[in-house]
Amino acid sequence: MSNGKKNNNNSNSSLPLIIIGLVLITALAGAWWLFNRNTNPNKTSTNTNSAASMTANRTPNSVSNPMGAQPPNLLGSPNASVTVEEFADFQCGACAAVHPRVKELTSLYGSRIKFIFRNYPLAIAAHDKAYNAAVAAEAAGMQGSNKFWEMQNLLFTNQQVWTANPDYRRIWEGYAAQIGLDVERFKNDMAGLSAKSRVDADMQRGRSLNLSSTPTIFVNGQSIPFEQMSVETMRQIIDAELLKAPATQQTPAASGGASNTAPAQSGNTSSANTQKK
Amino acid sequence: MSDAEFLPEESGNKIAKLPLAASLVALAGLCDAIYLTIHHYTGEKVPCSVTGGCEAVLTSAYAEIGGIPLAAFGAAAYFVAFSLAILAAFGNRLTWKLFGIQTALMAAFSLWLIYLQAFVILEYCQFCLLSAATSITLFLIALFSRFWRS
């Protein structure tokens, strides 16, 4: 190569590097701008939805946090003085373990509490079907007030069955038939946006509360640590909240105070007072 | 010269068209991947009007590797592809060879991701499909340049 060519190449060799540098800077600046535009002031920048350990003392504030799906999946009385709000993921083993306890509590307290179930499918490797499972429960809920709870119950109690099965959607359709749903409509609702947007709304609420693990249960805004999610401990917490509430807000059944006197009810689905349309 | 005709020979003034086109496609892929990465971290819902399955795909088990969103790897890969293509556009033959190897891997990986969307997750995400389209296009450009010279 002659000297002239060498010089020519050298003068040109810096141009691609300049372009690459400019693109890198623009890309980083664009990413920074997007990040700031999308970050809600209520959220921390490290919210990556990973299943990290629980963070303590999160309090849901209905004013500053998104409301979640409206109307919520609700059991008990919407006017009860004690609100129990559970965020759960259908592929989470701990959620399935806590499910019968929560079910027991809702039937035990009936209209004395307001129980809200929120979908919070975690974006982690082992939970690849969790989001769709939440959509399935919501799609079931579109066919009647109790169907959400029936599907939710089936999804939790049969978690091991469908979670490992590649043909899980067919299994869910089987559940839909089992609880008397119009299966074709259920499939359509699963594909549609309404059920998904309800799940997304719940997730948005969960994220705004910086939830990082499931199940997370709030009793009147106070997060209950997982170790305390036994029926006995949760009853103590709910009873304490019921006693705190002004007498005027309590329903007649709650006036006795202790949950021991609560009338037994046959189960979630039969005592359901859902507000879903 | 045994190398491709699309690359400028002798003179550094000419800019090769195919690598330049490839760099523009890589830029589009880079924008898409950055967008998805940021959405992953902010947790914002991705607007998904065409295919309707973005949330299912982007929150699936396959959306992360070791806690890092797949889109972040994609952004890095597109940036490298862009850099290699730009260097090739200015006459660097080695980077164009590397570009061919890299985009072959990216296209293969994209095909696997399309398979996952079609048969495992059973939902499509338009931004993921766009990314697959760009990486396959990059590979096709690299492939085309090989045949073009002969």
Image (cartoon, helix red, strand yellow):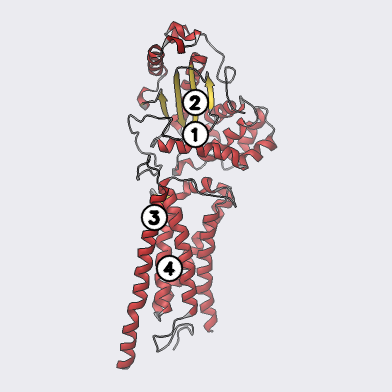
**Residue type (three-letter) at the residue carrying disc 2:** Ile
**Residue type (three-letter) at the residue carrying disc 4:** Ala
Q: Tell me if label 3 and label 1 are in contact, CB under 8 Å.
A: no
Q: Is residue A151 above or below residue A30?
A: above
Tell which subunit mark 1 falls on.
A
Tell which subunit mark 3 falls on.
A
Q: Nearer the viewer, mark 3 or mark 1?
A: 3
| Quadrant in which the N terminus of chain B is drawn | bottom left
Q: Secondary structure at mark 3?
A: helix
Q: Secondary structure at mark 4?
A: helix
Q: Which mark is residue B81?
A: 4
Whether residue A133 is visible here, answered yes or no, is: no
Q: Tell me if label 2 and label 1 are in contact, CB under 8 Å.
A: yes
**Residue type (three-letter) at the residue carrying disc 3:** Trp
- At horizontal 52% and vertical 18% (from top left) the residue drawn is A77
Which residue was labeled with disc 1?
A68
The Cα–Cα distance between marks 4 and 1, rounded to whole angstroms, is 41 Å
Please state the horizontal and vertical placement of residue B22, each as a whole percent of the image: 48, 72
